[in-house]
Image: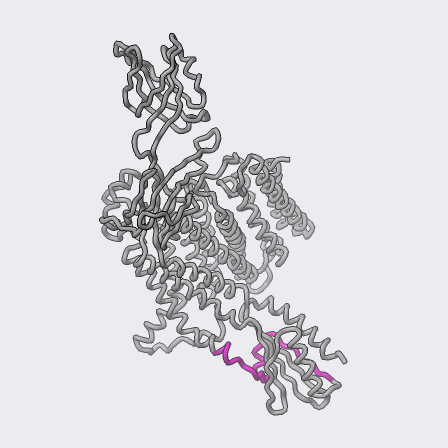
Amino acid sequence: METTNVQPSPSPVQGNFVDRLWDFFCSLKLAIITLILLAATSIIGTVIEQGMTPEELAEKSGWNLNTLQFLDQSINAFDMYHSWWFLSLMGLFAVNLICCSIKRFPFVWKTVREPRLVADDGFFRTLSNVEEVVVAKGTLDEVRTKVTAFLGGKFASASVTEQDGKIYFYAEKGAWSRFGVYVTHASILIIFGGAAIGNVWGYKGFVNIVEGSSVDQIMVRGRQEPLPLGFAVRCDDFQVSFYEGSQRPKLFSSDLVVLENGSEVLKKTIVVNDPLTYRGITFYQSSYGPADDATFRFRIRERATGQTIELTAREGEHVSLPGGYSFAVTNSTESYDKFGPAVQMHVNTPDGQHGNPFIVLQNYPEFDAQRGGEQVFSLVGMDQRFYTGLQVAKDPGVWVVWLGCFLMVLGSCGAFFLSHRRLWVTIQPLNKGVGVKLGGSAHRNQPAFALYFDTLRTELNAALADK
Amino acid sequence: MTSSLFFNVTTAAYFAAMVVFIFYLTSKSIQVGFVATLISWGGFAANTLAIGLRWREAYAMGYQQAPLSNLYESVVFFAWSILLIYLLFDLKYKYRAIGAFVVPFAFGGMIWAQRSLDSTIAPLVPALQSNWLTYHVITCFIGYAAFAVACGVSIMYLIKVGKEEAASGNPVGGILGMFPSVKVLDDLNYKAIMVGFPMLTLGIITGAAWANYAWGTYWSWDPKETWSLIVWFIYAAFLHARFTRGWVGRRAAWLSIFGFAATIFCYLGVNLVLSGLHSYGGGG
């Protein structure tokens, strides 16, 4: 950002309407006000949960339904980041950026492309960092050689202009850092562009795939009809694991296979934070659930006879046992506290009496013996088919967004940490010896440059005194 | 040698540094200021060691994770970041009085973490199992810390500016005489935000990159994302205010303070008050 030579003087008051409109769109004040308005209005959508209905939010929060309905109808508060007024504010921000840059860029371009090569006395008076040295002995040519070597060695090679018996040197460093702010501004517009591309040519959707089955179409947000993928995705297996001794999930994973015309073309096990991408469409592990009722395999020992039988039961189903008994599984879990897989079940007596519910643990086959029932149940295995819930996204604009982000980092580093530093040296023959004038300026961070200039000044004196 | 011992040492050191810095303002003794800075360095060393030990303790428990996984760990890392930025500024600019207005933020964070937050080391849920977590948290917190320094400096500015104007050119005496001049404070405010703003930008970008990698959307207007953007807007306004007549000085200082208030809300308020994608993280 530049305060000195890039801001033209304000236009005259009698400027016509178009001029004033132009100045309005170029002004920094507009930028500040737009930024503050964007900050202030953005808060609304963080308080009012986006995507809900006024009724849902009123129920959840206890807020006044009429107020919420009014906010919904008047300012589209439940989808405010896509409302006309918020997008207009963003648009104003973009127009302001563009106008600012168009207005100021030519001055900066000129400063960089056509630098002042000749520093006369008048110009030296405008610089705050100046040093004057008189070299008593030596010719103009000797001093010229020394100055050329000094600038080339300590700073940057100089362009030399000879005029009216004087020799003018000009050297600069980091001229391109002046463009940092424009790169930053442009990067914001590029990110907007990338977002627009994603909105027009991309989509966000989801699909549930039951283990062992495949899908070739997905549901897309904001559309009624399912969208054909052009290929199929099969889920061979879904796994969820927990940290030992807790309910804290450790890993969700799905073994996915991509099928083109029935033949496998790609296999990948996806986990949260590691998706599968095929033909620009990416599948993210997002949720899971049971696809149908689980089946349980039991080994049952009759306490009296010691005879064992094996039986299979679905959840909720009553399964007959020898001697008129029956049992049913009422609940199950993959992880019962720290004991692993478990079921809750009960046994009905031959006269139809409903027994007390009890727990059977897969990892402790003899646990049920302690219950003292007629039968001892051991859980051999649980078979539960799951479905894996996948987010599906296609966003051809995402690389444009990353390009914008990269340029923003690059541009702001240029804009904040680097400065365009310039040095001018003029040498001229005097009555006695040769006069040397050194001047310098930086377009940002003056105190640091003043320190740097002090060092240069000492070094120049040393270089000139050197035989 | 446990991390919790060193976190206690850190808290005590930041408290001591805060008290000695305030004593420095009243005593005007250069030696006292030096001692306060020395205690700050000691606290920073203890803070660093404590985070390192906690990292090792997590590995010993079998969790391959950086100590940035829950609210407790993020708060102690925030305190560490504040001291890092503050001490770098102290090395470069050597205005001791600033410590009295910046170290309290770090102490506040530490005492809150030690007294009220759950310090159990818990393994990461699947959503947080990513290297992006480290990049995202480090960039964000370095940014937040720079904003904390800017906020402290802005408070000093607002305390001093009226008195200095009333004194019309004469140096201000008393405790305020120990403050850098308002011109320097204004410049330091800008310099701190110049560090914080690019770091916040990087923090938002790494967050977006991670969200895109893990969920397929780089931006979903979730409250945490939106609040980080609100903070970004405020500091962007601040940076442009510096080049506009009528917006320098007091207004810039107020913008810096509002910016830090929004930063704290983004960091804590969103998790404690609002809901969204970051709620599982319990912070960060």
**Where is residue A220 shown, x and y percent of the image?**
28, 49
Q: Is residue B98 above or below residue A173?
A: above
- Looking at the image, residue B106 sits to the left or right of residue A40; the answer is right
Query: Which sits in the foreground, A32 or B250?
Result: A32
Q: Is residue B255 above or below residue B49?
A: below
Tally of marks: 0
Query: Which sits in the foreground, A15 or A352?
Result: A352
Q: Is residue B254 above or below residue A287?
A: below
**Where is residue A189 shown, x and y percent of the image?**
38, 64
Residue A116 belongs to the span the image colors magenta = yes
Query: Which sits in the foreground, A268 or A3?
Result: A268
- Residue at left 26%, top 52%? A76
Quadrant of the image occupied by residue B49: top right
State whether residue B166 appears in this view.
Answer: no
Query: Which sits in the foreground, B90 or A283?
Result: A283
**Where is residue B77 shown, x and y percent of the image?**
54, 45
Q: Quadrant of the C terminus of chain A?
A: bottom right
Quadrant of the image occupied by residue A444: bottom right
Residue A224 belongs to the span the image colors magenta = no
Q: Is residue A310 above or below residue A151?
A: above
**Where is residue A256 shown, x and y percent of the image?**
38, 44
- Residue at left 67%, top 80%? A147
- Residue at left 31%, top 43%? A214
Q: Residue furthest right?
A: A467
- Looking at the image, residue A294 sits to the left or right of residue B176; the answer is left
User: By what rule are the colours in the image chosen?
Assistant: one colour
- The boundaries of the magenta stretch are A110-135
- Looking at the image, residue B35 sits to the left or right of residue A14; the answer is right
Q: Residue furthest front?
A: A263
State whether residue A109 appears in this view.
Answer: yes
Quadrant of the image occupied by residue B56: top right
